[in-house]
Image: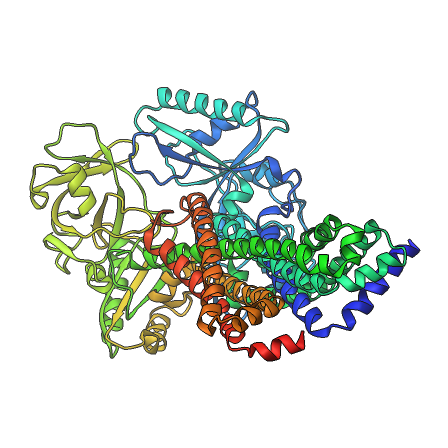
Amino acid sequence: MSTLLQDIRFAIRMLWHVPAFTVAAVATLALGIGATTAIFSAANAALLRPLAYPNSEDLRTVRTMFTDGNVTSGLVAPVELNRLNDKTLPIERAAVSRKFDVTLLLPDNRPRAAIAYGVSEGFFELFGLPNTLGRGFAAEHWERQSPNVVVISQRLWREVFNSDPAIVGKAVRLAEGGPTIVGVANRDLDVPQGTDLWFNLRFDPESVAHSFDGYLRVRPGTSPEQLRATFESVAQRLGRDYPGPETNRAFIVVPFVDAMVGDLKPTLVIVLAATGLLLLLACVNVTNLLLARGAGRVREMAARAALGASRGRLVRQLLTESLVLAGAGAIAGLLLAFFGMRALLTYGVSKLPRLEAVSFDTSVFLFILLTLMASALVVGLAPAFQLARSGLETLLNESGRSVRGSRNTHRTLRVLIIGEIAVAITLVAGSGWVVKSFANLQAIDPGFDSRGRLVVDLTLPFSRFKGPAEVNTWVRTLFGNIARIEGVTAVGSSSGFPTRPDNDPTPLVHVEGVTTPPVVSRGRTVSPGFFDAMGIRVLQGRGFTDDDRATGAPVALVNESFARRYMVGMDPTRGQISFGFPTVLPQTKRNVVGVVGDVRYASLQGEAEPAFYLVQDQSPVLRMSVAVSTSLADPRAAVDAVRAEINKADPLLAFDVVPVETLIASTLSRQKLGMTLMLVFGAMAVTLAAIGIYGVIAYASAERSREFATRMALGASSSNVFWLLAGQARVLALVGGVLGLAAAYAAGRLASSWLYEVRASDPVILAGAFAVVVTVTVVATLIPARRVSRTDPAHALRAD
């Protein structure tokens, strides 16, 4: 132990005497370790940190799909929940939830939008977290005639009720009623994310309406194969028992943590891999510095060997110095990671799932420790191996040092330069793929125009209206008032809004004159002005007008995908459709009066689904997204006026007014984060590579200054020396470039499945990465080469 402390003290003293070298090495390692640690802390929080629920690895989410490609909401039906709760299955419990937007009335009567979820029996038991207050739902709350009661979230309890310890038994004031509070949920229960309150939802257990999010807990020790066989068997039995809605339907079961994180996972994996390469590049740079410095320390090592130090003792001292450097780099890197994560949280990362509280916990500190040890080994092994290959005689023989030792060192440095070039090309190409993926997403035509538009989500309390006629009158009056605001050009509403969670139904649809079985399509309800307000094109026939009233002929529109898929060989504007679930209802027959363009509702990446549209007057809905189109350069200038009109219409409505461009941008926040980080890491990689290559070439040139001076004294020109060095650099650049292209292509093959419409063989990205890094390499080489070629040979020979 005392020997190790002695080695550390000696290493610190030696590094203290070369401050420029030490600062450069520590800063380089801090950059690599800091970036890697910051991204690992985010990945740890999102992907690795255990969920707060007991045995969370047994939790799953459940969705459904049609195996024949038919459209479906992807949600779960009560009949499926009923079957999954069969005690003979390897499933401990299954439960469902359904979202409801409600308005909470604060003590001063101000409205506040709240998210409520109706949940099935056993929901809280499935997640296994005890309530903070109250017993929660009891058996009597699931009886048919029992009133609705609620469990409120701890966040709502704290923010609205001031953490009142006597809150259980009191009523919560909602515009929709006043249910009694029976509990305050555990602070760690946030399912679904952002829920303010849960209420007891009763439904027909034989219903085939797919309107619920599903969750389940599998029995411990259940294998994936056993679980897959179970779901296939349940799906087959449901298909036999409920032909039509359950035919060709399959379950999609995903680990709960993966469902929470969603498409953030591939972004973090790609960026974490990039930081690993960046750390490797930093280590190679420091290794180059140590090798170059080590070549100048041969006399020191020879003197120590002459005084009795063994070769193993000298190797250990070099490894200790690399450990001290790595330790200092890790400490500086930890500070850099801390402030880097604060910057990322400010950037908006905290709004992403599971990243609201990124902490430097035990896992992160263990990661830093492992990174420190790995960096110390990577940095110290090459100089130590170089020394180990040299015998004592070589160390004591200055001529042996100058020939054999330099050749070995130069050969190792050339290999490391090639590695630096290859890693840098891989990182630059990775940045190119991520940027192209983001650009491809931004270039997608969503089927509407987001510029100059606002969206307002409204949920009208059913108790306020006596019937559909009153709803329609209220909506028409409000829209008329908003339309008169200066700068507003169109107003319209829809039951669902693009890029928001798509909860519009997927009924069976019969197309008149088509003899095939009923098809499945999205059914949406819009007001006459919606297509104009969103810039959605009417391709055939006409759109809805103010004349399409409840007393008029029932009409419908279909989108382009519906017409192309289900109305082949006929004029869609002369067709008729009927719909319903679980069977088509004849009384729903409507004349199709037009075809509108496809709109990507679920996401920008997903294709538009077949959909038909009903008009608000003929099929009133209470929950709607109101689109407001303006001619203003910044639509936010109309926000206050729109807000005033809605408050005038109903002061108890809770709502928010959001620019549609902001809404669309938020759907790409994960991709934007990945693009930003990859651009930063790519720039850092090129910078590190340039610095490292410049330093190595400058060192090698200085080492060979006598050789070059002799060549010039014997008649070689400055340009001969310059092109000699340039030619050697060109070989290194080409070899490193070819290896880098191969590595970049392999990395691209892995990443392309996670990115949007990018190919690993994209010639523009590969050629661009090659050109950028090789150009930087050449420039970093030519600067010291030019300086050496201009050296006065007489001066160099005298100095030697």
| Visible residue check, residue 465 | no
**Image spot of residue 376 (x, y percent):** 71, 55
Res 255 quadrant in image: top right
Indicate whether 449 appears above or below 65.
below
User: Closer to the camera, 370 or 129?
Assistant: 370
Which of the image's four quarters has the C terminus? bottom right
377 left or right of 301 in image: left
* Displayed quadrant of residue 284: bottom right
Check the image and tell me how it is coloured: rainbow
Q: Is residue 165 left or right of residue 126?
A: right
| Front residue (pair 603, 711) | 711
Residue 47 showing in the rendered view: yes
Place of residue 371 in the rendered image (x, y in percent of width and height, measured from the top left)? 68, 53
- At a point 68% along the width and 63% down the height, the residue shown is 334
Q: Position of residue 688 (x, y in %)?
A: 55, 64
Relative to 705, is 195 above or below? above
Residue under the image location 48 percent in, 28 percent down: 82
> Residue pushed farthest front?
714
Q: Position of residue 252 (x, y in %)?
A: 44, 34
Horizontally, is 349 left or right of 402 in the view?
Answer: left
Most extreme residue toward the right is 2
